Image (cartoon, rainbow, N blue to C red):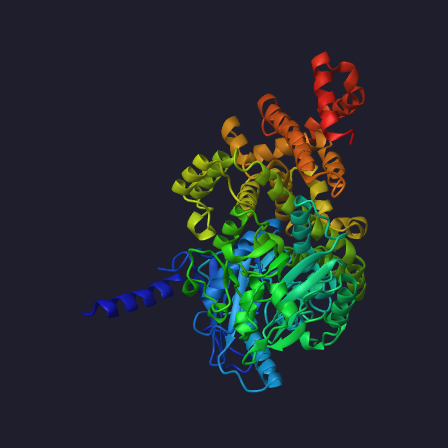
Amino acid sequence: VASLDEDRILRRFLNVIDSALRTNYFQKTDSGDSKPYLAIKLDSRLLEELPAPRPLVEIFVCSPRVEGVHLRGGKVARGGIRWSDRREDFRTEVLGLMKAQMVKNAVIVPVGAKGGFVVKHPPVGREALRDEAIACYKIFISGLLDLTDNRAGDVIIPPSDVVRYDADDPYLVVAADKGTASFSDIANELAIDHGFWLGDAFASGGRDGYDHKKMGITARGAWESVKRHFRELGRDIQAEDFTVIGIGDMAGDVFGNGMLQSEHIRLLAAFNHRHIFIDPNPDAKTSFTERKRLFRMERSDWSDYRGLSTGGFIAERSAKSVRLSAEARACLGIDAESLTPNQLIAAILRAEADLLWFGGIGCFVRGSTERDADIGDRTNASVRATAVELRCRVIGEGANMAVTQAARIEFAAAGGKVNSDALDNSAGVDCSDHEVNIKIALANAVADGDLSTEERNALLHRMTDEVAALVLRNNYLQSQAVSIEAIHAPERLDSHARLMRTLERRGQLDREVEGLPSEDALSDRASAGHGMTRPEISVLLAHAKLSLNDGLLESDVPEDSHLGDDLMLYFPAPLRAEHVAGIEGHRLRREIIATSVANSLVNRAGVSFVTEVAEERLCSQGDVARAYLAARNVNQLRRSWRAIEALDNKIPNDVQLEMFGEFHKVLTHHTMWLLSNRPRPLDITRAIADFGAGVAELEGKIESVLSPAGLANMGARQTRFGKT
């Protein structure tokens, strides 16, 4: 080959072929014909010049009707399947979503995955387009299943007529996403037709699963973050009015459910792809009632809204221009009497409000140093705001990728309250994970005839509220963990820097990809007395959990008999009471235990705790986890933490966080003592038996055994915190 360009092209083709792990090319239909689509599984780590982050594997599906790709961050991974409209760069879109999913999934058992497909020949007409999308979705899902191993009991069954160049790989689950919200039953029917071992646990949220919109679970999870942000500003948004601007409409899951989370919302302005909503001076009570009516209405949009305040209006986004009332101009803080629809949307994003709520699709806020051309969402480039232009106090990210990480950091550094999209809206994937794991726990009972499918479905329905409570508890604790870390961010900057370096050495973190500060930036912050921002801490929280989870799975900690309680507490009470055997014999028992321990440890002890203790005591992550679990239970810290959390909106937030800090000292001291004074690996059950009763007895006699100095110290604490 004489041409350099041609040589490069041919080498790229060869590299793709060398990276291929499986293909369905040799499979036939029932009639003996070749399949009308091609699926290829690739080792993404071997593909040259791929943008970061690199998945573990990906499956590319191609036919004359559809193209799609499914990216997985690990062997056990989950994420939604999106109907993409980005024909030219749908993999770029899916990669960005997978990156967010990896961080989001730190709270659940599987790591992140994401899939997307494009309809290559979209027909005219709404119904015709939907029918074609369903047909394309079926092809795409079939391509994924064609290359996935099956299992019968403990036996792995490879797909027929497929040569495998990788290890067994039987875990594949999918979920709904943009454009596929009602497709879960279709995916489950395909899985059942394939005889796939997960059955209707393959795609969560179908007719025999948890309906996220009915539960409002994603919005409710993000609302836990929103409530905390305002609580730290000294406001209880469940008891006092506050103003909101947002992206979405009341027919949507996340926006609609979000705008029903408090009766004190005063929604000033919102927009979706069709309409612009302006209500300059809404009454909280009457507007809440109207939003609820629209939410319950079939296929409502903003044009159905009734009862706008004086000067309010609904504008079409297709209009040439929009005339603004005096009240609307005052509400938005602008002087122009007329604007184009895009100019009006730009003004809404920059309007003064307590909360900016994202419930729609698109990227609407970037960092001041970023270029619109680099964002990847050209549709909203003309309305997009920079972080410094925002005049809201709090951002709630019910939707993914509405704000860039650079914008979040900039907004937080200026005093705004924001976490990350992955942390805020993790409840949806958490709920899906619970559904799948509950169905796996019940699978043997159904297969053996001890439980009918109808009885299983009735049990799932009966546990809906408790599943929601378990999921929302995770959202509450993660946002709280960020707050505890953030209040100490300046003095913990060195600890955070060491954690990032450790994760980088392990190949578990790419600072540039995650938008985390460089060494030079860290030096500048140290000189200025600044620490990591909430969005950065949110990312560190996730990666600390992912790293610890990996370490626990490589150890024998999940086999410790004491951790049966952690396994049980993952599941709702009715399942624990009626199906103990299904839980104890769960196929993902080790993974559930590791995830539960990692969540508890990092949420309660901090993002740098494991790394620092392991370095100081020259021990493994598993050793630290054992000592933490023993110290937690010996001191009955769960009871103490719950008591502090019960004081939300009753005492100042900074006092609450300081109280958590006091118990953190106890936890740290006892964890370190156990690692220094007990043989390794620590016997958790024995340590609790040796010290638990003594600590409990001492608690009731503490005043009689303290020295005068100790009593004075305790008295000062009681004065500071109150006898709580």
Image side of residue 19 versus residue 205, left or right: left
Image side of residue 9 versus residue 99, left or right: left
Q: How many numbered markers are drawn? A: 0
Image side of residue 177 versus residue 257, left or right: left
The residue positioned farthest toward the left in the image shown = 2
Residue at 72% over, 71% down: 308
Q: Is residue 536 above or below residue 94?
A: above
Q: Is residue 402 above or below residue 610?
A: below
Q: Nearer the viewer, residue 684 or 704?
A: 704
> What x and y, as percent, mark residue 685?
70, 31
Q: Splitting the image into 4 quarters, where does residue 689 fall?
A: top right
Name the quadrant of the C terminus: top right
Residue at 63% over, 72% down: 325
Name the quadrant of the N terminus: bottom left
> What x and y, as percent, mark residue 53?
44, 55
Q: Nearer the viewer, residue 360 or 618?
A: 360
Q: Splitting the image into 4 quarters, where does residue 651 fall?
A: top right
The residue positioned farthest toward the top in the image shown = 708
> What x and y, as percent, mark residue 413?
52, 46
Q: Is residue 159 visible?
A: no
Q: Is residue 156 visible?
A: yes
> What x and y, as percent, mark residue 134?
59, 78
Q: Nearer the viewer, residue 266 or 208?
A: 266
The residue positioned farthest toward the bottom in the image shown = 124
Q: Nearer the viewer, residue 396 or 695?
A: 396
